[in-house]
Image: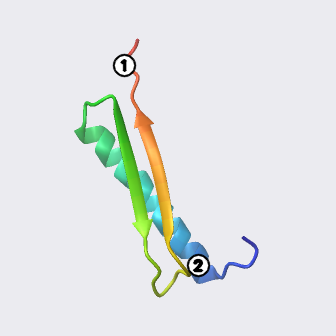
Amino acid sequence: MENLTKAEIIAIVGVLVAVFFGIIEILKKTNSKSKDISVTQKSGMLSKGKQSVKIKIEKDDQK
């Protein structure tokens, strides 16, 4: 991680923010118990290689 440039750090933070907002939107729109989310950023101007984030969301409605 210490070898990352400022542009690469901004790209990684951008992917994480997109995942965060995507999770919020999915939780607002769905009533299912679980959901798998996968976000992939292919290599581009600000990144070196493919970056991906995989998240599994499970909702527990017990009160």
Q: Nearer the viewer, residue 54 or 2?
A: 54
Instruction: Single out the residue that lies furthest toward the right.
Output: 2
| Left or right position of 43 against 9 | left
In this rendering, is residue 6 above or below 12?
below
Q: Quadrant of the rendered structure where residue 32 is? A: top left
Residue for badge 1: 61
Quadrant in which the C terminus appears: top left
Amino acid marked by disc 2: Glu
Q: Callout 1 environment at 10 Å: few (<14), some (14 to 19), or many (20+)?
A: few
Which residue is rendered at x = 43% and y = 71% of the image? 41
| Residue 38: x %, y % from top left | 40, 55
Q: Which residue is mark 2?
A: 8
Q: Give amino acid for label 1.
A: Asp
Q: Residue at x 28, y 39 (%)?
A: 28
Q: Return the residue nearer the eye: 54 or 7.
A: 54
Position above or below: 43 against 14: below
**Secondary element at tag 1:** loop
Residue 61 placement, left or right of 6: left
Q: Give the answer, above or below, for where 30 lies relative to 11.
A: above
Helix, strand or loop status at disc 2: helix
Quarter of the rendering occupied by the N terminus: bottom right
